[in-house]
Amino acid sequence: MRFFVADTGGGIAAEHLPRVFERFYRVDAARSRGEGGSGVGLTIARGLVERMGGQISAESTPGQGSRFAFTLPAAV
């Protein structure tokens, strides 16, 4: 099964996409935790998806938003 989550926010620059699933990585390092989270949400999502045998990915266009996709094996 394939799932998608998308937003219409500011997007993520291409040079940051390979790192968005790293623990504590934040695209905008100038933002405080109160304004931008702690940088662990996507790391947790990746861990859960991979532990269930799936894969997760991100794509984004700056100024247009981001789209995250993940696959999980179908239950038999």
Image (cartoon, grey):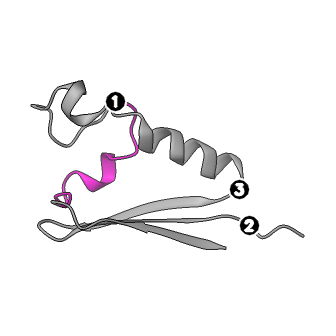
65 and 51: which one is in front? Answer: 65
Which residue position is annotated with label 1? 24
| 50 sits to left or right of 22 | right
Q: How crowded is mark 1: few (under 14 residues within 10 Å), some or many (20 or more)?
A: some
For marks 1 and 2, the one nearer the N-term is 1
Q: Name the residue under label 3.
A: 53
Q: Quadrant of residue 1?
A: bottom right
Q: Residue sitting at 41 percent across and 34 percent down?
A: 40
- For badge 2, the amino acid type reads Pro
Task: Name the secondary structure under disc 2.
Answer: loop
Q: Which residue is drawn at 52% across and 46% down?
A: 45
Q: Decide if residue 49 is on the left or right side of residue 23.
A: right
**Residue 75, position as x, y percentages in the image:** 84, 67
- For disc 3, the neighbor class at 10 Å (few under 14, some 14 to 19, many from 20) is few
Give the alpha-carbon distance from disc 1 to disc 2, as whole Å: 28 Å
| Residue ranking furthest to the right | 76
Q: Which of marks 3 and 1 precedes in the sequence?
A: 1
Q: What stretch is highlighted in magenta?
A: 11-23
- For residue 20: magenta? yes
At which x and y percent is residue 9?
20, 61
Given the image, on which type of amino acid does mark 3 rest? Gly
CB-based contact (under 8 Å), mark 3 and mark 2 = yes
Q: Which residue is located at x 11 percent, y 67 percent? A: 63
Q: Which residue is tagged 2?
A: 73
Q: Quadrant of residue 66?
A: bottom left
Instruction: Measure the C-alpha gap from mark 1 to mark 3.
Output: 23 Å
